[in-house]
Image: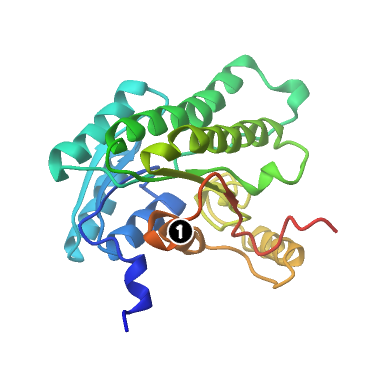
Amino acid sequence: MNDPLDVFRLTDRVAVVTGASSGIGRAVAEVLAGAGARVVLGDIDEAGVAAVADAIVADGGDALSQRVDVSVRADQDSLVARAVDAFGRLDVMANVAGVASDGPLADVDEAEVDRLLGIHVKGTLFGCQAAVRAMRGRGGSIVNVASGAIDLAVPNYGLYALTKSAITMLSQTLATEVGGDGIRVNVIAPGATLTAFTERHLRDEEGEIVPERLDAFLDAMRARSPIGLVGEPIDQAWLVLYLASDASRFCTGQIWRANGGQTIPR
């Protein structure tokens, strides 16, 4: 009998991960490498992403890194080309890079609109385009990252939710266009996950976590979840592993929610 876990292994496969210097992106990079993939990591934080790649190599994996501004098409093309040049192929593209944006829609200025559209929409599109060119003729898996904000309207998160919602339609439409090439495209919509991204609300003026704010946040997030949990980056990384692997060979064009049930209508 074959080992059923073999279907999750990524031995000899090549993955590109953006936003890999911290949070969900770092966890995705580490999990894919742990499953056997050779990973090429991109982030605008050049030193941070290099440290992640070095840690993976020190742990016995294969990893390269480079600075990438995902909103710049040439940077995305260069990142994917690095993977193909170094390892001969591309099997997985995880477009994880993202940024926060807070404030009421009525007050958002044009510069902030352009920033979010650039990173989330253009960044995801450019990553997908580069990946499709590299995957045609052999197939592959693209995983994009939206947010639980696509399911639940929350004041002061409108611009963020708008751009993350665009990622879902981008992903589903692309799935219909490239399925014939053996390329699967899925999108994950994380629930509240404790990372630097969410911790911005929990810090004081000196940048230190305020214990009372952290406790209040955790209590509020647990209260939204029927199972009383708050997500960690690894919860999203395990989902990306499933979507990157052959275990999800029949899955494309879907929105996947590891969110503890936080957005169940009730």
Is residue 74 visible in the rendered image? The answer is yes
> Which residue occupies the foreground of this view, 251 or 31?
251
Q: Is disc 1 placed on a helix, strand or loop?
A: helix
Side of 191 where 65 appears, left or right: left
| Residue in view at x 15 percent, y 45 percent | 87
Is residue 203 visible in the rendered image? The answer is no
- Residue furthest bottom as drawn: 1
Estimate the x, y position of residue 113 in percent, counting from the top left.
60, 21
Estimate the x, y position of residue 248 in percent, counting from the top left.
45, 59
Estimate the x, y position of residue 165 in percent, counting from the top left.
64, 36
User: Label 1 amino acid?
Assistant: Ser
| Residue in view at x 57 percent, y 43 percent | 146
Q: Is residue 204 above or below residue 232?
A: above
- Residue furthest front as drawn: 180
Q: Is residue 209 above or below residue 7?
A: above
State the count of labels: 1
- Residue furthest right as drawn: 266
Which image quarter is the N terminus in? Answer: bottom left
> Which residue occupies the foreground of this view, 193 or 103?
193
Which image quarter is the C terminus in? Answer: bottom right
| Residue in view at x 65 percent, y 49 percent | 148
Disc 1: which residue: 248
Crowd class of label 1 (few under 14; some 14 to 19; many from 20; radius 10 Å): some
Side of 25 where 166 appears, left or right: right
Side of 180 where 108 appears, left or right: right
> Which residue occupies the foreground of this view, 179 or 109?
179
Q: Is residue 137 above or below residue 256?
A: above
Estimate the x, y position of residue 134 in percent, counting from the top left.
27, 34
Place residue 2 in its image quadrant.
bottom left
| Residue in view at x 43 percent, y 35 percent | 178
The colour scheme of the drawn protein is: rainbow
